Each structure stands twice: as structure tokens, then as C-alpha cells.
Amino acid sequence: MHDETPDRPESSLSGESTSEQRTGLFARFLALVEWLGNLLPHPVSLFALFALGVVIISGIASATGLERPDPRPGNEGDMFTVNSLMSGEGIRWISQSLVTNFTGFVPLGTVLVALLGVGVAERSGLLTTAVRALVLGAPKNLVTLVIVFAGVISNTASEMGYVVLIPLAMAIYHSLGRHPLAGMAAAFAGVSGGYSANLLIGTVDPLLAGITQEAAQIMDPAYEVHPAVNWYFMIASTFLITGAGWFVTARIVEPRLGAYDDRNASEDLGEQQTMEPVSRVELKGLAYAGLSALLVSIGVIVVAGPPLPLEWIPGWGVLRNPDPTAAGPAAFKPLLDSVVTIILIFFVVPGFVYGRVVGTMKNDRDVIDAMAGAMRSMGLYIVLVFFAAQFVEFFKYSGLGQILAVMGADALVAMNLNNPLVFIPFILMCCFVNLMLGSASAQWAVTAPIFVPMLMTIGYSPEVIQAAYRIGDSTTNIITPMMSYFGLILAVATRYEKNLGIGTMVATMLPYTIFFLIGWIILFYAWVFLFGLPVGPGAPTLYPAGGGG
């Protein structure tokens, strides 16, 4: 019932074509993944069992003396060991940290604060009207493409993508009479699966570059890695992820999900929107809300300071790094760290302005009621986060993640590859590690000191090695419950599918992982080795420049 998924011809009497047979096999494979995954307990129970499993495994691993050498610079001779959660010290840590594990879980505060603003915009009707205006004003066959692209761009400030774009994509698809989970999948694929594709330099780039530089200096103490070393490859990857995300959504995910039944919703979603034209008063409300958003934007520019000083705007602002030597993203670190606060303001102010114009909000009590309503809808998420936070912190405390990462790295080193094919097992190893360590910086801090020097010795630059690592880091984000926002997305999606389980989520997102991984590896080899293009400004392919192995 939409333009992006063409009608499929019925099979001929002589039997299905080879292509149709392959499609059928893939569909049966996804159905098997979904069935196996949905045999798992409720996600809350599953995270509780995971946490308990970490306690038991850490005790066994500690008793058997499991350890591995610490490969990080400056830690020569040190060992990664297992901290037993079954010991007296471990039990005391659990007892004393249970509350702080929960309250210190970063996505919890990020989500709740941002949703205070989203609740105001939603209750006032601003989001609903904006969705209708967007859908009526854009070709329907471009909706998925726009959502995936917006997801990739939004990962510059990742919280905005997870908290705002994914729920909004579900609302857009539902308003079009399409399956909301397809909208969720498209947005999630762009935000998280395409985490290392972007047209812009984000907050993670300086962090990874710093780790890469430390690892490179094991081989070459004078080697420097700047934050934009992967920028060219990231720009090219943006278009790859956008196109692949559209293809998978339109050709695989949405046909598999089929038509949506509102009876599957866990709450009253109201009558399906009929896409009636936006009324005159609603257009007036949108205009005033847009004006207020513009004023907020100007305010942000003033307090942050523009990249270049203008006559009427100072070159320095309170949200700009006071260190005069800071350059690039570091100069705007306070601004980037204030993304959640800016999201809150950007939704509260235009939401209230819109509500005043159209009559859905009159005073502060209406704003408070809207915020309270947004919090009431997050009950399941809060419960899930409590157990998910315990699992993540137990795993971190135990040290099992670091040891598993080093063991995976050792296996790759044992393959003794000394040609460009080494990047395939390297990327696959990064995919595997990402299933256990959700933080890009945490896993790179452990693996970079092993692989950067190793691959430099056979002739590849740290910049190229980091680009390859980011492929593996991104593509499995969308299928691992260890990803910090996985629980949020699952909880929000249950609004539309009350019986949604982890198996359905993983099966829905798995095609993106497969297509992104294959496509990204092909792009990497074509970009670096076929066309010999640099992955970023001033980034050589070989080490030393002009050499190779």
C-alpha cells in the first residue's frame, strides 16, 4: 500500500525462480532467528539472568586463574584478571553499588530529561501536526530514504537520534498506514548501524583518534592522529548506509512485517490518522513554533560562539571551550556535552508556543501535566534499565569483557596474515567484540594497542586501521542488547507491538547488519586498495608513507 515496495509477481506454475527461492530461504532463516530469540524470557528477566550469569562465571573464571596480558601502553607486564563477584569483596561491591549502578546509567538520565521536552511537544500536538505536514509535503517513496539519512546525520549527537528520531519514525510510519516497526528499523539502522558514517565530525572522533595515536606511538613515538582522519571515508559511507538502509527496509524488512494491526498496540494509539490537510490554525501554530525554534537556535549560537566571529555575534560564548588553544570539535566540547539540554529546550519552547496558538496549552500546569504524562509512559523502560544497568556494571567490574577482547585479538594475530585480507578477520573480530563491549572507546582502548602496532608492522597506517575498526564497531550495534539504548528502543517499540521480544528485534535488524557489513567491507577495499583514496585529510594508506608490506 506504499510506493517503496513494488508488487511481487506471483510464482509461475513451473515453480519459483532461483531468486525467489533464495528470498524464501532468507525469510525462513530470519523466521528461525525470531523464533529462537522469542524463546528467551521477557527482556527484564533476561537482563536479570545475564547479571546472575556474570556473577557465576566471574566466580568460576577467577577460581581457575583466567588472565591475559594487558596490551595498553604503559601497562607492560600487567595482567587482565577476573574480579569474582562471588567473593566477599564482590558481594560487598554488589550490595553497595546496586543503587549507583542504576542512577549512574548514562542513558537513563539522557532519555528522561529529553523526554520531558518531547512530552510537551507531543501533548500540545506539535509533533502530530509536524508529522502530517512532513508526510503531506514530501513524496511518500522518499520517506524511508529521508529517515535513514536523518539517522546517520543525527548520530553526531547520538542521543537525539535514539530519543527523538526513532519514536518519530514509528509515528510517521503509523500515520501512513505502514508498520511502525519498519520505521523503527529504518531510523535505528541509520542512527546506530551507521554510527561511523557521517557528513560531520562528531564527539567520538577525537576520542578514537586519541586512542589510535597512543597505540601508534608504541611503534612511532612521534606519530600524531588528528580527529578528522576518517572524514572522507565517513562521507562516502553516509551514502552507502543511506542507500543500503532504504533497500533493506523497502525490500526485506517491511514486506516481512506485513500490514500493521492496531490491536497489537499496548496502549490506545487513537484512530489512525487519515492525513487530513493541516488546518489554518495549525499552520499558524507551526509558523509560531518555527519562529520560536529559530530564536532558540540564535540563542544557542550566541552562547556557543560561531566558528568565525561575526560583527554582531562575539567569537566566544559561555558554551565554547574557554581554552584558547582548543580547535575543531574540542573548541565546542561544552556545546556538544549540552546536547540533551538543548533538546529539552528545543521541544519545550516550540511545543508550548504551538499549544498556546492552537489552544491545547494555556499555562504552566499544562506543561507539567505533559511532562508527567511522558514519564508515566516510561515505566517499563525504567524497570528494564535497572536490570540492564546491573548487568553492564557487573560485566565491567568482573573484567570479563577485557579478557574476551584480548582472546579474540590473539586469535586474529595467530592467523599471521600480512596482506590486505587481514582486514576481513580484523573487522569481523571487531564485530564480535562489539557484541560484548557496547562502548566504542572502551573496546578500542583494549584492542588498538594490539592491532595498530601489529598492522603498522606489515605496512598499514593507523588511520586506515581505525577506519576498518569503525566498520566492525558500527554494524553490530543494532543486534546486541549490550548497546546502551537497545532497551529504550525495545521499550518504545512495545507501544506498537505489546508482545515484542528480543528475538523479533534482532531478526528485524539482522538484515541491516548483513548488508551494511558486506557493503562497507566492499567500499573499504575499493576506496583504500582499488582506488587508493585517503580515508581522511592528511591520512596516508601505508606506513611509513609510500611503504607497505
Image (tube, rainbow, N blue to C red):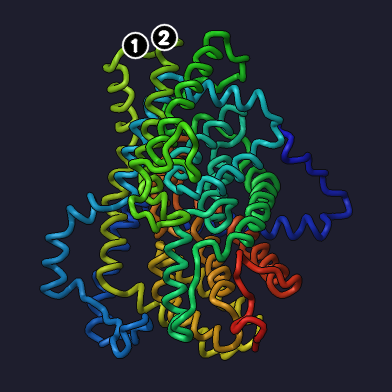
Q: Which residue is mark 2?
A: 359
Which residue is located at x 56 percent, y 49 percent? 152
- The amino acid marked with disc number 1 is Lys
Tell me the quarter of the picture where residue 217 sits.
bottom left
Quarter of the image for residue 77 reads: bottom left
Residue found at x 26% / y 58%: 390
Using the numbered discs, state the Cα–Cα distance from disc 1 to disc 2 in whole angstroms: 7 Å
**Given contact means CB atoms under 8 Å apart, are the residues at marks 1 and 2 in contact?**
yes
Q: x%, y% of residue 35?
A: 52, 55
When the figure is inspected, residue 494 is found, relative to residue 269, above or below; the finding is below
Task: Give residue 236's position: percent from left, percent from top.
Answer: 67, 57
> Where the N terminus falls, by quadrant?
top right
Disc ID at residue 362: 1
**Whether residue 40 is visible:** no
Q: Quick one: quadrant of the C terminus?
A: bottom right
- Please state which amino acid type lies under the numbered disc 2: Gly
Q: Residues within 10 Å of mark 2 (few under 14, many from 20)?
A: few
| Residue at 69% over, 50% down | 243
> Residue sitting at 41 percent across and 67 percent down?
436
